[in-house]
Amino acid sequence: MVYRGKPSGGCNTCRARKVKCDETRPVCLRCTKARRTCAGYRDQLSLWFKDESDATVQKVKALEKSGSDDSAPPPTAVAAIRQAAAQVYRLQHLTFSIPVFNFALDHIFQATCLFLKSYSWLNVSCLVEQSQMHVLSIGEKAMMTGIASVGLANLANLHNSRPFRISSRSEYTTALQLTNAALRDPVAVKEDTTLTAVACLSLYEIICCDKESSLLSWYEHARGIAALLELRGEEQLHRGTGLQMFQVLRNEVLIGCLQKRTRMPPTLIRTPHRPNSTAQSYCADRLVEIAAGLCDLQFQMSEGAVTDSARILTLAMKLESDLEDFSKELSAELPYLISLRTKSQISQEEAVNAVSHYNGYYHVYPSMWACNTWNNYRYIRILVNSLILAQLQQVTFHPERSPVTPGIKSLCRHVRALLRQLATDICCAVPYKFGLAQEAERQTLDPLVAKAGTGFTLLLPLYLASLVDGVSSPVHAWAMRCLGIIGHKMGIQTAVSLMTVLEREQGWTGWIDLLDGEWDK
C-alpha cells in the first residue's frame, strides 16, 4: 500500500474545467449555481494509497523461483487494511494508520459516527466494536445498516438533503429486510444486535415522521421491541449491555402503551428489590410499576370497564399517592441541584435567545440517566393528574351528579399548581439535557447537532408540559422554542410535527382559571 500524496478534493466537473471547487457534499455549490451537473467526487482513499499487492506477490514468486530461502511471504496487513478501509464506517474507537479525516468523506461513515455520538444511551458502541472481530452475522448486518439509516435520516433533516434522504430510505429498507431475516433465526432473534436493529427502525420513524403512517410504523416497531424483550427473558438482565438496553427500550414500550391505551406486558414489569438493586435499577423498576397501573386504568376506560367518574377519580388518586411517595424516594436516591443565573448572565444570554435557563433557573443532575428518570416521573405524573383534572371537570360542570364542595375546589387548585410545577421542572431540566447547564459562556447551539439522542428523550416531556396551560403561556412558548431546536438543530422531524399540533392546544387548566373568581365569591 503505497502513499501517493494528497490529491485534489474537487468534484470531477470542477477538476475537468480546472477551477477551484468548494467541495460541498454531496454536490458542490459552484456547479449548482452555474446549473451544471456535478459529476461527484472521487474515492479519496483509493487516491491517497495505491494498492501494489499484485506487484509484491509477483516479486515474491520471482524470489521463490530463484531459490532464495531467506525471503519471507508478503505481510497480510495489506489485505487487513483494505478490509478495514471498506468497513471503517462501522468503527467508533479504531486506531488506524490512515488519517481518519479521509474516511469522513464517506456519508455512511458520517452517519454512523453521528449515531454513536448522539444515541450513546443505547450503549451499542461495544456491539459495533465486537462486530469487527469476525465476519458479520445476520443480526450485526441488520444493526449496522439500521444505525446507518438513522444517522443518514438525521443528516438529511439537518441539511435538507434529498440525496441523504434517499440514501437513508434505502438503508432503512435494507435494514428492515435484514432484521426480518434475523428475527426468523432462532439464535439471532435473542441477540443484542437484533434488538438494536429493531430499536433503530423505531428511531428512524421518529426522526423522519413525514406522515401519520410514520407514527403507526413506530408503534409497530415498539411492539416488536416488547416482544423481543419478553422473548429474551431473565438472562438479558444479568449482562451489563442487556440490562441497560432492557431499561432504555422498556421506556419506549411504555410510551407506546400509554399512546395506544394498552396494557404493559406483565413480563416487563419487574418488582423492585431494594437490597439487590442499584438506585438506578430500583427507581426505574418502581416507576414502570406505577406507570403500568396508569396503562391498566386507561385500558379499562377505553374498553368501557370503568366509566364512573368517582371510580376513575379514586383509582387515579391512588396512582397520584404512589407517585408522591416515589418522588420522595427519588429525591433521596437521585438528588439534583436547582441553580439560579445571575442578572448579568441572563442579559448576555437573552441577547442570543439562549435556552440555558428557564426564568433564570436550571437543574444540575448527577447523570443523564438521573435526569431522564426525573423527566419520566414528571410526564407520568402529569398524565395521572390530567386524568384527575378531567374527572374533576366532569363533577364541576355537572353539579346535579354531586355538589361542588370546598374540598373539590381546593383539589382542583392543588392539581393545577402541581401540573404547573411539573411543567416548570421539565423546562428547568432542558439546559442540562442540551449540555448548557453551568456553562453560561457557551452561547452557540452548534454542539446540539450531536445531541439528537437527548432531544429524542425530551419530546414527550416537553409536549405534555406545553399542554398544561396551552398557548399563550410562558411554558408553552419556551417549550415550543426547545422543540424547534430539537427539530431543526438536531434533525428530529417529530418535534416539528408536535409544534404544529401544539399551536392550537388551549391547555388543561384554563377552566379552573375561569371559575376562580366565581368560587371566591
Image (cartoon, grey):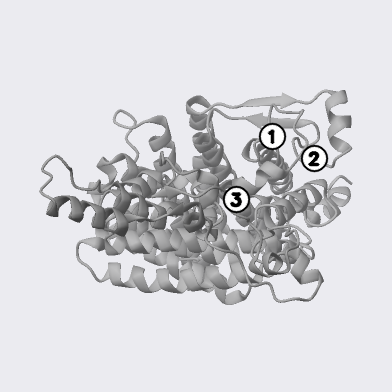
> Whole-percent x and y of residue 514?
85, 55
Residue 239 or residue 149, whichever sits in front: 149
The earlier-in-sequence mark between 1 and 2 is 2
Which residue is identified by label 1?
436
Q: Which mark is residue 350?
A: none
Q: Nearer the viewer, residue 357 or 48?
A: 48
The residue carrying pointer 3 sits among few (fewer than 14), some (14 to 19) or many (20 or more) residues within 10 Å by Cα, namely: many
Q: Amino acid at mark 2?
A: Ala
Query: Which is nearer the N-term, disc 3 or disc 2?
Result: 2
Which is nearer the eye, 108 or 514? 108
Q: Under tag 1, what secondary structure?
A: loop
Whether residue 296 is visible:
no
Say if 60 sits above or below 96 in the image: below
Q: Position of residue 499 (x, y in %)?
A: 73, 61
Element at label 2 = loop
Of marks 1 and 3, which one's residue comes earlier in the chain?
Answer: 1
Q: Give the Cα separation between the discs numbered 1 and 3.
A: 15 Å
Residue 373: x and y in percent read: 51, 40
The x and y percentages for residue 231 are 26, 60
Q: Name the residue at 78% across, 47% down.
A: 478
Give the residue type that dot 3 points to: Ala
